[in-house]
Image: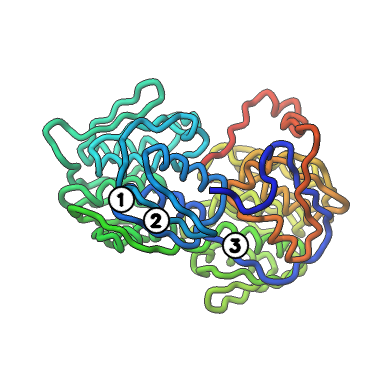
Amino acid sequence: MVCESNNKSYLKSQHLKIIGQNTLRGKVKISGAKNSALVLLAASLLTDEKIILDNVPLLTDIEKMGNILKSLGVKLHNKDNQLIIDSKNIFVQELPYELVNGLRASFFCIGALLTRFGEASIPLPGGCNIGKRPINEHINGLRALGAEIIIERDVVKAKLVEKKSKLFGANIRLNCPSVGATETLIMAASLAEGRTVIENAAREPEIQDLCQMLNKMGAEIYDSGKEKIIIDGVQKLHGCSHKVIPDRIEAGTFLIAAAATSSSITVSPVIPNHLEAVLNKLEESGSKIIKKGNSISIKSNKIKAVDIKTAPFPGFPTDLQAPFMALMTIAKGRSKITETIFENRMNHVELLNQMGGSITVKNNIAHINGVKKLRGKTLVGLDLRSSAALIIAALISKSVSHIYGLEHLDRGYENFELKLSKLGVPIQRETSNKIISKTKCKSSESIKKEISEIKAA
């Protein structure tokens, strides 16, 4: 699969040149949800019949997952935003570390491979520490379903209990409502023997999208979107056609950008109730929101400071914490942003401060004093959502900004600069002769600490 934007090789030497202080006007077409498409690709391993996915975003993360499936023998055919997946002739093997590394969603394949073939072997993605990351929820849940799992040299090896031909249903209560673990266990339980009940399950729209596709394939899953999900295992799953839901995080990013630039735009297609927490905070901060069918319009002027606290759905999404912080840098008053999901998701604070923000952080709580203006800078985004935050800050800023780190941005936003350009933003992707080092954007204190790039975004 090839990303649609032109000239995306050598991404580390590329940057976006953005002229700030412009007003956005027009409509934005929202792409399919990255976090949904990734797990739907993994779910295609559950059947030997063809799956047709529509509205698949053209992103580097999707390309990586496609390459992982190809390494297993899956045949993929893509045309524009449609992907035809043929998993009939899979050969089960350990997934190559070079493909898995850096894509945490690759671990979702373990549930599908284990329940269909009775075994799976997957390296821990992105160097995850099993004690700190929620992958332990995946493993504990699979063990409850009857899998034997060992971890050797950072490779998770799972197989069915001796003399068993299938996983078997179980009652599982997650210690935390992990999205990835909920998805992995739903897939594993779909072909297990008997009933599985997952309590304290994640409720995100992407999970609901997965369950909808699996039910089209012949699964029997009840109450997705609730804290308790019930799965009755079936003998076989079939092919189907399915359309990926719109990306609520992309939609939220554009709405926040409009608020930051005192603009009026419309985003569609969207599912408005997927964004309820974000829309409430945008309204609270002074924007006018109009919901009509599958579109959301925003009209913004003066922004006032509001507090947010990230939480699992239906709370404020962690993936929009960084973009919303960029908005709060120029809000009138003092705001507080509390990150409760990821312990290392404040990488953008220092960068926003370099652009003129006034932010202090302690114990994953950011205190922001709104300033009248930001200034353009040359900076490197350190992860997917912090890169989006820097672009929003650049839209606000006086003068020109050069934002590097596009290898992160292209993981989760399809043609981001093209969409901004259509809204009237003077923005272009350029290639420089030298690669900008991340350390040029860090203080001496932060250089001492290894910044953990967020792979879960």
- Check disc 1 and report the residue beneath it: 186
Amino acid type, mark 3:
Ala
Residue 95 located left or right of residue 194? right
Residue 165 located left or right of residue 54? left
For residue 324, above or below residue 173: below
Percent across and percent down for residue 382 are: 66, 38
- Per the image, label 3 sits on a secondary structure element best described as helix
Give the quarter of the image for residue 226. Answer: bottom left
Q: Which mark is residue 251?
A: 3
Give the quarter of the image for residue 392. Answer: bottom right
Give the alpha-carbon distance from disc 1 to disc 2, as whole Å. 9 Å
Amino acid type, mark 1:
Ile
* Residue closer to the observer: 343 or 441: 441
Percent across and percent down for residue 237 are: 25, 55
Please tell me which of labels 2 and 3 falls first in the chain: 2
Q: Residue at x 65, y 67 (%)?
A: 28
Percent across and percent down for residue 122 are: 37, 32
- Per the image, label 1 sits on a secondary structure element best described as helix
Give the alpha-carbon distance from disc 2 to disc 3, as whole Å. 18 Å
Q: Residue at x 30, y 49 (%)?
A: 46
Asked if the residue at tag 2 contacts the one at tag 1, i.e. Cβ–Cβ closer than 8 Å, the answer is: yes
Amino acid type, mark 2:
Ile
Q: Residue at x 37, y 63 (%)?
A: 241
Give the alpha-carbon distance from disc 1 to disc 3, as whole Å. 27 Å
Q: Residue at x 61, y 63 (%)?
A: 281
- Check disc 2 and report the residue beneath it: 207
